[in-house]
Amino acid sequence: MSNMQNMRCVVLGAGGFLGTNLCRRLVSEVASLRAFGRRQSFPEALRGIEWMPGDFADPTSIAAAISGCDTVFHLVNATTPASANIDKLADLQANVASTLRMLEACREEGVKRVIFVSSGGTIYGVPQEVPTPETAPTSPITAYGISKLSIEKYLGLFEYLHGLEYRALRVANPFGPYQLALKNQGVVAAFMRQSVADHPIQLWGDGTSVRDYIYVDDVVDALCMASTHQGPSRIFNIGSGEGRSLLQIIRAIEVESGKALTVHVSPSRSVDIPKSILDTRLAHEELGWSPKVGFEAGIHRTWRWILSQEGCGEI
Amino acid sequence: MSNMQNMRCVVLGAGGFLGTNLCRRLVSEVASLRAFGRRQSFPEALRGIEWMPGDFADPTSIAAAISGCDTVFHLVNATTPASANIDKLADLQANVASTLRMLEACREEGVKRVIFVSSGGTIYGVPQEVPTPETAPTSPITAYGISKLSIEKYLGLFEYLHGLEYRALRVANPFGPYQLALKNQGVVAAFMRQSVADHPIQLWGDGTSVRDYIYVDDVVDALCMASTHQGPSRIFNIGSGEGRSLLQIIRAIEVESGKALTVHVSPSRSVDIPKSILDTRLAHEELGWSPKVGFEAGIHRTWRWILSQEGCGEI
C-alpha cells in the first residue's frame, strides 16, 4: 500500500474551490506540495504553501509545475457547463488539448500517478438510471461533459501505453468553504451569499431539479484515497448518493440562516438535467470511501464559513 | 420515410477507399453529389462527379464544401491508429477540432443530417465481450479510437442542442476495390498487391489476431440506409459479425491467386488487439441492413479488381 507521507505532489487548479480545500489537507500529509493555478481565490487560505502562478494552457508553465513531482492532482476547469456549449472548440482546446500536453509532460518528468477530477453531474447526460453507476452510458449534453469524458479516455490510453497511473473521480455537486459564487456554479455558496446580503436569488426552472450535493471535505477524502488506491478500478463516482431539489437547498439555507430567501424564477436552461444522483457503491467497496459529513452538517459548516468571510473583499 | 432521390449530398474524405466507393454509388441515387477531399486516389473512378479539392482542417474550404447540401457524409481520417498514438495532440486537432468546425458550418448552412464513419475496430479497445455490441464499454488503446468516440459524443451534442441529425457507423475492417495499401491499413489490398508482385508480406505478430472483415459494398449499403434511417438508435456496428485471423486472410488470398505468399514476421504492435468481432444485430434489426457479399465472394471481387489495376500507376 502506497503512503501519502512520501508523496511529492502538485495540485493543478489549486486556486479554486476544490483546489484550495485539497491543498489545505495535503500540506500536512505529504512530503512536498506545490500549488499551481492562474490565481488564488483565497490567498490567505493557501498561506505557507508553495504557490506557482501559471496558465494550464502554457506547456512551459506546466512542465515547471510538474517537475520533481510523482503525484499530480488535475483539478483544472477552464470552462463551465454553460460556457463550454457556447464555444465548444475553445472548450476542447482549453481542457482536452491542454491536458494532453500536460500528460506528455508527466511522461517526460516520470510522474507516477495523475488523479483527475471528472464530472459526475455532466458525464452521463440525461441518465437512464438513477442513481447512476459508473457503467451507465455516457451521453453528455454539454461540451464540458464531453471534455471530461475525453480526458478520462486519454488517461486510460496513457496508462495503457506509457504506464502513467491514473484515477478519475466523477464528483457530483460539491459544496463547502472556499466555493465561489461566480460562473453559474455552486448554488449553495451563491444562495448563502445572497441570503447574507438580503438579495433575491435567481432560480433556473421551477426548483424541482435534483442534484447530488456532497460536502467538500468528503471529496478531499476521496482524492487522498485515490492517490494511494491499488485496486483494479480507475473511475469512481463521488457523491452523497442522495438527491436534493433546489427547493430543498433553499429551505435548508432558510432554516440555517433563520430567514426567508426571495426567489426570482427564470426559464430552465438546455444544459440542465432534471435529476442527477450518483451510485457510489464502487467507491465504498473498492476505495473504502464514504461520506462522513451529513447534508445538514455540511450546510451548517458552510454557513459558518460564509459568515466568517463577510467583509473580506472579493467573493 | 426519407428518400435518397431528393438528397443534396457532400462526401468529405471522398478521395479515399470508402469515399470513392460511396461516391460511385451515390451519384446515380441522389439529387446532387459533391466530392470533397485532399486528393483522389483513383481519379478515373470519380470521373463525372463534382470534385472539390480542399483540406478538412480549413474552415473556409469546409464551408464551401457543405454549402447547399442537406446531407453530409463524414469519412475523413486525418490519421491512422498507429500514427495517432505517436502524436496524440496532432490527432486531436486534425480529427476532433476540425470536425467541431465542420459541425458549426453544418449548423450555419442548415444541414439536416451528418453520417459519420466511426471505428468498430478501435473504439472498444480490448473488448471484454466478443462479438462486441454497441453498448459495450469504450476503452480505446489508440488516440485514433478516442477521437472517433469524441466525435460521436459531439454529434450527439449537436443533435441535442441544435437539432442537427446524425448517424454513426462503427465500421469493422472494410476491404474491396479502391483500397490503398498505404499507411499500414487494409491488409487484404496490401497482401494481394504483394502477391501480384511476388513480394513477401509483412506480418505483425504471429498471424492469429482476429478481425471482422466486411466487403466495401456492404458498408456503402449501410451508409445509404443510415442517411434515411428514422428509428431511435444513432450508433450502429457494421461488420460481418464473423472473425477471421490474418493467417486465414493469407490462406484465402493464396487460394484465390493460386500461389503461396512469403511471410516475414515482426513483433506485434501495442495498438493491436487480439480479437475484434462486432455484434451487428442492431443494424440488422433497426437499420434493416445485412451484409450481402460473403467473404470469399468479396475476396474474389477484390482480387479481380487488383488484377485489373496492374500497371495503372500509383497504388
Image (cartoon, coloured by chain):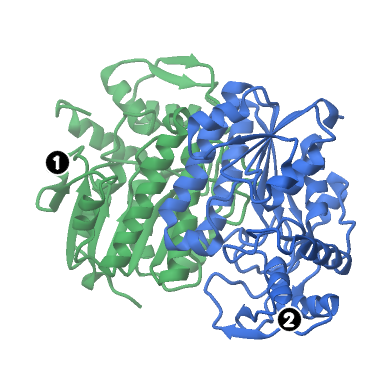
Chain colours: A green, B blue
The reply to whether residue B28 is in sight is yes
Viewer-proximal residue, A106 or B256?
B256
Q: In this view, does A231 lie to the left or right of B175?
A: left
Q: What residue type is labelled 2?
A: Leu
Q: Is residue B193 above or below residue B229?
A: below
Viewer-proximal residue, A83 or B198?
B198
User: Which image quadrant: the N terminus of chain B?
Assistant: top right
Q: Label 2: state its secondary structure.
A: helix
Q: Position of residue B272 (x, y in %)?
A: 58, 72
Whole-number angstrom distance, CA of label 1 to CA of label 2? 65 Å
Q: Quadrant of residue B127?
A: bottom right
Q: Which chain carries label 1?
A: A
Q: Is residue A245 above or below residue A290?
A: above
Which residue is found at the position 27% from the left and 42% from the top?
A16
Viewer-proximal residue, A123 or A294?
A123
Q: In this view, does A295 lie above or below A219?
A: above
Viewer-proximal residue, A40 or B278?
B278
Within 10 Å of the Cα at label 2, are there few (<14), some (14-19), or many (20+) other Cα atoms?
Answer: some
Q: Position of residue A77 (x, y in %)?
A: 35, 42
Q: Is residue B299 left or right of residue B188?
A: right
Q: Mark 2 lies on which chain?
A: B
Tag nearer the camera, 1 or 2? 2
Badge 1 vs badge 2, beta-carbon distance below 8 Å: no
Which residue is found at the position 70% from the left and 70% from the top?
B193
What residue would you read off at disc 2?
Answer: B247
Q: Residue A43 carries which label?
A: 1
Q: In this view, does A203 lie to the left or right of B74?
A: left
Which residue is found at the position 46% from the left and 57% from the top?
A154
User: Which image quadrant: the C terminus of chain B?
Assistant: bottom right
Q: In which quarter of the image is residue B29?
A: top right
Q: What residue type is labelled 1?
A: Pro
Q: Is residue A130 left or right of residue A223?
A: right
